[in-house]
Each structure stands twice: as structure tokens, then as C-alpha cells.
Amino acid sequence: MVRVKFRYLVVNFLYPEPSSKSRTDLPDLVQIHSPTPDAFNAGALVRLIRDAVEDLYGDYGSGMVSSSLKVNYYSPSTSTAIIRCPRDHYEMVWAALTYVTRLPKVDVPVVCRVLRVSGTIRKAEEEVIRRSQNIVKRAKAWEGRGADPMLSSVEKNVEKERKREDVLAAVDQGEESEEMSE
Amino acid sequence: MADASKKRKQTSDSAPRAKRARFPQKPAHNIPTISTRNAYPNGEVNVKNFLKSHENEIKSLEGAMIAAKKGLSRRAFQDVPRELRRRTASHNPNRVPKRLRRRARQEAKEDNTPITRGTSGSGIGKGKKKYLRKEGIEKSKQVWKQREQKKAEEKGSEQTGTEQGTREAFKAVPKPKTKPRFPSLATPATPPSRFRRRQRDKTWLPTHIWHTKRARMTEPKDPLWRFAIPLAPVVKAYRLTHRTAAQRGAIAWDMSYMSTIGLEGVEDSIVGLLRGLRFGAEDAEDPWQRRGKAKKWRQGTRAWEGWLHERDTRPLKRIAHVTVIWCAPEVDGKKRRAFARVHPSAFLQVWNEVVRISKVQKPAVIVEDLRFEVGSIEIMGPAAAETLCSILHPSPSDAAPDAPQSLWSTLASVTDPGVLPAGALLAFDISDPRLRDPPTPSTIHQDPSSLIETLAAWPIDSTQASSSIFSRTARLTGQRTLPSQKSINRRQSANTLGRYPEPRPTDPSIPMLIYVSRESKSWTVLLPWKCVMPVWRGIMRYPVSTGGNPRFGGLKERRQVTFERSVPSFPHDCPATDAGSSWELKQQDVRKHEWTKRPKGKRIEWSTIDLGNGRKGEIGDPWACEWARLLPNAPAEPTAAQDESEKVVTPFRQLSSAQATKLLQDPAIEPEVPYLFTVKIIVVGRGYPVDCSRVYRLPTNNPELRNKWLSLVPGPKSKTNGVPRRQQTRSGDDVSEHLRRRELASSLLEPPAPKDAPTPAEDDYPLVPDEEDLIGFVTTGNYNLAEGMPTAVANLALHRVLCIPGDKAVQKEDRICIVREPGRTVGRLATWEVV
């Protein structure tokens, strides 16, 4: 029997905007990787993807993708998921995820970011572990020194660049927006 | 009316439906996750909960990976390959390892498997007896329950004062320390009470329990040299051992049974002691020179292996093969220390000699028995160096860049210990290997030039500090400060990011010494006795860069490895030493027992063997190598009454290979002392020499028989090389048509080819020579995987080999011999060469 092959997408759900309920001053790292509300579970995720694929690719897309769609791992507390999809049409699922702006039941703005596409679930799990370790390291460093080392180094470099070339164009805030460009 | 069509009742399912699939086709892959409500109680998002939730995620994913790797098990035990299986499967949760018992009980409950308490051996009985005793069993159960209740009550109210009093009474009164006039033999440390009874007349190796689960050990009533030694692993490992030692991987032995004798004194007295015992008298290099390797040895940077001989005997009689290691001289001390490592079979003899000669030295040498204080592990194979480099991590200390600690990690890429200087030695303190568990593969540096420089210059000769393994306090401290496994586990779990725990100042620094032996191509690690187990476990878990883990071996594998190099191993192949001959006696008993326990119809009847020409019966004891028969003035029948004592004094002397080759080239005077020398025997053609096989020379008194034997020798033009042509593979498909025709024509025209050499099946096969042509016996014979043919290591008597009419030296054709297994009537032609 021929083996049906899949691709496993490692997906992160990022929350760039702080929810109105937040009281303490959280580091950006923790804010972005906030946990997902429990109401959005694995089943809701599958439905979300199916609807999005049907939206984008119609009957053909949903026919190709929806039968082999499965959520292997979904952790609401860390907003990470491993999704299985057919090998030849994984881009459809990827595109569908990219176009998701809000979680369906809970109206929270969200960014779905695909970290890795892999052929085996083992490599997907390893990737999740690696990213988690990285996050833990950065968070620990932030805790220890009050500043995220990665972010602060990026900021330092940007400052250096800016000092070198002060011919950078000043960016106006909000003067021109896409809606008004017509 | 009842339904006539359904006369037969529907049989209900005999077995209850299993709640889980018995043989799942695709194991369910379920990774546990934690919901947001549980990870962030009260809905607050703070950094602490964030960290914890991510760490939990890492843990659960790693667990999922491990579970997927092992395959989901069906029961509490797994279906594992043969070499990893520990015990037979069982549905009784009580017969399953302790840590799996709870799980097995749960599974049994889920599946509705009845858990019966075993009744074998109990008085409850089975069947009829049990039925008749039903009421009585109930009553005794009640009585037991009441008794337990009463005991629990009593224990709660009992005073602990009485217990303490008894405990104090049993505390051993420390003996007053008198200056020992005669150094006493050491006793092993008292083992925990549950193992004490089994170690009354033997000692366990530090890794005993690990070995018992994986290897066949010596019988409990029948220990070897008063140690419980693993004989062979449970898994069949003849070829695996050969491949591991020769090609890829590593194989390790727990050699803690090798006895160590500690010498302490002024350098000149120790030198005088060793010289008196004629240490290294037969070596190619003189260990008492003032320069070169001997000087480095006495500085404590090399190990020297040589033979000890008895005092005041001429010619020299060997006692044992020892390795002597000096301690590098301390800065201020005049006292030097040395270790002498010797095989336990010869320990007592060596000990007595050393103690006697130590008293004669002025000033006297202090001799200590360190058998149970210093343990060792021996590792062989191409991956040995990288294993040791990863497991033996030097404890943090500031050391010079040339010191052994710093150069140690660069030696990981060494695959052949022969590239290191002969007898090279490194000594430094290591940290507890359990802190760096699971072991990571050692990094092999890509830059070979620095390694080559190190090997060429060997700066350790000048930077080796005096090793702490020679001092008792350092050994005991290292042993006593070993933390418990629990505390190490706690430290490791506190460290979640996958790195090793930070070293602390309270960590033990274990003294260690490692030396290389060129003749056995192995690394030997000396450690304090109790520290051998953590290092051994680390070694067995190390992931070798070529795949798998290092193997372990038993006594049989150790002998096999030296046999494959055709080197005699002490004491098995050295019958000219007292240790060797007592080993031989023991083996005789073993073989005799093997023979007697077989039924009469299925064993060889020795007395009726027909050796042809009217000779019947096996020469001497068929279970023994009868060295006594080779003595020049031996009686026809060996003296029946041997001493009952274990100690056997052999009249033979052993010749080293250099002396043997010299004497064979040009036989000097007729030696009056019988000499033995070791040879390697290669069988020509077919045949398989076995232990105890008899070795004959070509018949001297029967020229016709002699010619017959010589005709069996394959000539230089023989294409088949002694193997009958039937066995050879037919090649030549690529020879073209016309050439084949030509060959066929020529073969038809030429005279009929001479008959092939006769096989033993035919009557023409030459008979075995007489007993007076017996020159020696085979001590180890087996199929040699390194050579690809059966070979043997044998000992021959010099006077019989030289005793050929005419005073010429032994020529090439006289190196032919005939080998015959005990009990067989057929002899095989073979060649021998001095080893």
C-alpha cells in the first residue's frame, strides 16, 4: 500500500495588541506570546482552517485539504499548534492561516505565524521545543536584567545605524493611509 | 412456542471485550497539553506563569518523542530486542519490576484480567486440598490480620530507648593500633546486610548487580578466585566482540578483580625489591636503565608490564605477569609509592614473595594489600578513547595548558592506543560522571596537527603531577563524598534548559589513573572501589559516534580477544607458572564433570579409542593437558597420587619468545631443565583444534608414515591450498569460449592428474604418530575471526622439539606438527610458529 504523506505545520498564534484587561507592564515577548483563551480549542481551530480554505480556494481547495486536516498538538497556554495537512497542498493551508485576522468565537485580533513545515512530526516537535527553550531563555534573561537581551541588542544596532546615516527619511505617522490613497 | 430456528443458544463472548486495543495497528499519538485556565490561574498573565507553561510544554513534547520512539507498549513490559530484554513477560503484576507494578495492576484492572496470588509452594494447596481446607484458610487469614494489627499498635507505643541500647552494644570496639609486624591481607568493605550472606566466601565486584542482569556469572558455590566474575554476556557475542574490538565500537570489562599491591618506601628499596624478584628480566628493554623509557617509568609517567620471577632459582621461573606503576615524585618527599597489579590467581604467591623480600630491604618497604580499595575498568576498541573522554571529565581546577587535564579532550579522536607512547599514563581528578548524564558524544576536533604534535612531543612526561589515587585519604574522600542518586536527580531537574548542572565546590573529585597497554591495545582506568559503578554506568550509556553503545564482556570475551591476537593470556595459557597449572587443574575438574554428567550412550568412551596400529585408549587423561608426560624422564604412567593440596609446583620453565627463537635456531647445550614455549598453530586444510588437543611432531621412527604425512602438505603450486576441490567455488564465467576449449583439450590430453591428498574418510590417511612424538598440548583453540581460520595457542616442550636425529637446527619443514583432539582418532596437519 502506498503511504500517504503529509506535511506538519508548526503554527504560533501571536497577539501583538495587548488586551484591555492587562494591568501589569509585561515585556513585549510575553505579550506577543500570550496564551489563547480556552474557548478556542483544537476543534475550533480545525473548523477555522476549513472555513478559511473554502473561503480562499473554494470547493476544490476544501476537497483537497479538509479530509486530511488534523490538529496533532494544540496548547492554548503557549499558543502553539502542530497541524497536519496533505503534502501537495500545504500552501493552501498556510495561506488560509495567513489570512486569519481574528479568532472566530472570541473576537481577539491574532496573527498566525507558520514557523516550520516538516515532513515528520518528530522534527516539528523538535522545532517547538527549540523555540520554547529560546523563549524561556530570553524571558529568564529579561527577568534577570529587566530588559530582553535580543531586543536591546537590536535596538542598539538600530541606534548605531541611525547615528551613522541621519539622512533617513522621517516617517510621518498616519498622514497617508491606504484607504485614502485613492 | 420457542423459536424453532434458533435451537442453539447464542453463545456469549467468552472473553470480556478489552477496553484498549490489544495490538494497535497505529499507536495512538496523544500529546498532553495544559489548558489556559490551569496554566494561568486567576487569569493573570505574568512572567512566572509564562515560564512555567513553556517549560511544561517542553516536557510534554519530549515525553511524546520518547514514547513515540519506544513504540507504545502493549503491557507494562515492552517488546524489545533480545539483547535489551531483562526478564520474561508475565501477566501477574507481582512478577513485574517494581516500578511497573502499579501500571501493570491498572492495566489488569482495565482489562478485567484476574489477579491471582501465587499459591505454589504455600501450604494452601491447589485443587482438592484447597477445597478441603477452605474454612481453615479463612481462619488463618483472620489470625494473620489480627496479628498485624497488634504489631502496628505495639510499634507505635514502643520505646526507642531500648533499641538504641542494643545498637550501641553492637558497635564494634576499635582495636588498639599496634604496629603490624606482618602486613595482613585486606578484607572487603562490609556490604549492606541483605547481601552480606552471599558475600561470605566471595566478594562482589562493584558492578555486580548490573552484571547479574545481563551476563552469566560464576556459580554461587563456585566462585573464581573468590570473586563473582561475569563469565559471558547473556547475548551471543562471539562475532560482535570480534568486530567491536577490531573494527568499530568499544567493549569494556570490569577488571576490579585484578589485585593491586601498594608499595611505599625509599626509591632504592623499591627498586631493590623489584630487582630481587627479577622484574622484567626477560623483557627486550631493561627497566633499570638510567635513560629512555625506563627513566620515564621510574618518574611515574609510564606503566611497565613485565614478569615477576621467583628468587634464587636458576633458570628463572615465572610467577606472574604484573604491571608496575610508580607515583610521580612529590615535591618534597623522599618516599616513593608504587602499585603492582597482578592477576588474582597468582596474587597469594606474589604477595608472599613481596612481603618476604620487603623485610630484607634497608630501610624496609611498606607493603599494603589494596585489592578492595582500587577497582578498574578496561576498555578496548576504536571508540574507547572518545567514550573515556566524554565520561571522565576533569574536575574544575586551574591547570597548565600542558597538563594531562587540558590535553585529555584532544585525545578523543585516537582510535588506536598504539599511537600513544608505550605505557602512556595520565592521572588527574575527575568529577562525578552522574552529573553529566546523559552523556554527549565527545567532540572530535577536525584539526589533526595539534594532536600529532601532542603525540610526538608528549608533554605530559614533564607536567604529570603526583596522582592522588596513591593516597588512601584521597581515595576514601572521593568515595565518601559521592552524593546520593536522589540529590543528583534533584539538581538535574532544577536545570530545565537541557544543560548539565553547575559544578559546586562540594562536588567530589575522584582520583583516577588511566594507562594504555600496547600489547593488549586497551585503556585501563584505575578508580577507587565505590566510584567504579557511576563510571561504568556512564560508559554503558555513552552514544558512540558510529552508532550504538559500548558493549561489555565477560571472562570468555577477554580470553577471546587475546586469543585472536595469538598472544598467550595469563594464567590460562601459561602452564609453566604455578597459577597456570592450578588453573589447569580446575579446568580438568570442569571438563571431567561435563563428561560424567552426559549419559553413557552419548559421550566418548576414552578407553576404546582406536588410534590405529594396535594402540587403544587415549593418551593420559582425556580431560587434561598432561604436562607430566612431557618430562624427559617421565614414567610411562603418571604418578597416580597427586598432592591433595591446591598448590601445584610445576617443574617446567617458560621461555620467552626471543629466547625460544634463539634456541631453536641454534640449539646450544642440552638443557637439563624442561622448558616450554608458546606457539601459534595454524591448521593446514581442514581441522579445528580444541582445548587440550594433543600436538605431535612428524613421526621420527617410521619414515614411511613420515612421508605420508609430508605428502599431505600442500605444495607451493597447489591451487586448492589444502581445501578439497569440491569446496571451491567455480569461477571463470568471464573466460572466453576459445580459451575454455583450449583448456579442455589440454586437460584431456595430459596424463591423469595425481590423486588428491587422501581424506580421513579413506583408508589411506596416515595414522597418528606414537606417544613419544608428543610435543605439547593446545591450551586455547577456537575459530579465529581475525585470521579467518581455526587457530590455536599451544605450549610445546623444547627438548622434544629439538630431539631430532642429526644435530641440525630446526628447519622450516620441522615446523610442521600434527594436531589431534582428545577423543578423535584423526590427526590434522598444522604448522607452528613461536609467538
Image (spheres, rainbow, N blue to C red):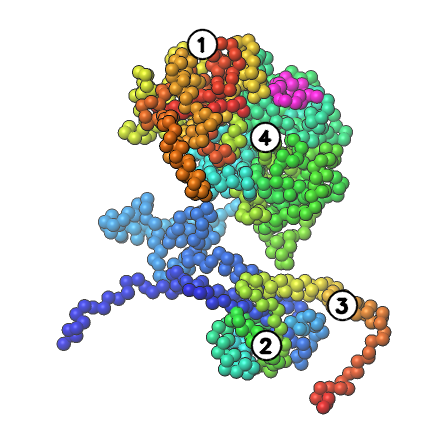
Give the distance between the C-alpha atoms of the residues marked 2 and 3, in whole angstroms: 29 Å
Q: Is residue B827 left or right of residue B449?
A: left
Say the numbered circle drawn on residue B230.
Answer: none
* Left-right relation of B790 to B181: left
State the residue at coordinates (54%, 24%): B835
Which mark is nearer the camera, 2 or 3? Answer: 2
Residue B743, magenta (yes or no): no
| Prevailing SS of the magenta stretch | loop
Marks 1,2: beta carbons within 8 A = no
Q: Which residues are magenta?
A: B270-289
Instruction: Provide the residue designation for mark 2.
Output: A95
Residue sitting at x 32%, y 30%: B598
Identified at 50% across, 31% down, the residue is: B563
Q: Which label's residue is closer to the chain start, 4 or 1?
A: 4
Judging by the rendered image, the residue that carries numbered circle 3 is A154
Measured in 3D between alpha carbons, the distance from the residue under mark 1 to the one under mark 2, in whole angstroms, is 100 Å
Residues at marks 4 and 3, CA–CA distance in whole angstroms: 60 Å
| Circle 2 SS class | helix
Subunit that carries the residue with mark 2 = A
Image vertical order of residue B26 relative to residue B780, above or below: below
Disc 4 + disc 1, Cβ < 8 Å: no
Q: CA distance from mark 2 to mark 4?
A: 67 Å
Residue denoted by label 1: B633
Q: SS class of the residue under badge 3?
A: helix
Q: Amino acid at mark 1?
A: Asn
Disc 1: which chain? B
Judging from the image, mark 4 belongs to the subunit labelled B
Q: Quadrant of the C terminus of chain A?
A: bottom right
Check disc 4 and report its element: helix, strand or loop: loop
Task: Check disc 3 and give the amino acid type.
Answer: Val
Q: Percent x, y for residue B787?
A: 50, 33
